[in-house]
Amino acid sequence: MYTALLRRGPDRDSAYYVGYEVAGQQIGLVPGGGPQGMTSPVAHWHVTDINAKIADVTAAGGTVKDEPRNVGGGRLVATVVDPDGNVLGLVQDPQ
């Protein structure tokens, strides 16, 4: 569906992560719902230090849904949940 919507294939395509980058925007998908059963797209926020940002988020009342993991090429992704239950992805590109 996303290939049809965006009229291009994904930039990253693996069994555990599919990522489209179009016009400076990232759509990151976890096929099959991922480790925690996620079933919808998640907006990803680019950060320079994913572990430091997770510490900031948890100090502000958020929780970690999925710990950071390498999805290929040194790109790290994680998901956090805000106190209202909204899920946000974090992305750290290789330095």
Image (spheres, rainbow, N blue to C red):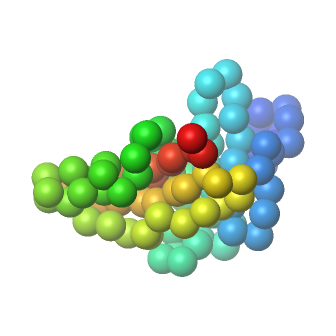
Q: Relative to residue 87, is residue 46 drawn left or right? A: right
Q: Residue at x 71, y 58 (%)?
A: 72
Where the C terminus falls, by quadrant?
Answer: top right
Which image quarter: residue 79?
bottom left
Q: Position of residue 84 (x, y in %)?
A: 21, 56
**Where is residue 21 shown, x and y percent of the image?**
69, 35
Q: Quadrant of residue 86?
A: bottom left
Q: Nearer the viewer, residue 55 or 33?
A: 55
Q: Is residue 60 above or below residue 34?
A: above
Residue at left 43%, top 69%?
67
Q: Which residue appears farthest toward the front when viewing the image?
A: 95
Residue 13 is situated, as x and y percent measured from the top left of the image, at 80, 56
Q: Residue at x 80, y 45 (%)?
A: 10
Q: How many marks?
A: 0
In the figure, is residue 76 to the left or right of 73? Answer: left
| Residue 84 shows in the view | no
Question: Does residue 26 appear left or right of residue 60 in this picture?
Answer: right
Residue at 32 percent of width and 67 percent of height: 64
- Specify whether residue 44 is in view: yes
For the view shown, which residue lies furthest in the left direction? 60
Up/down of 80 relative to 67, above or below? above
**Image spot of residue 17 (x, y percent):** 68, 61
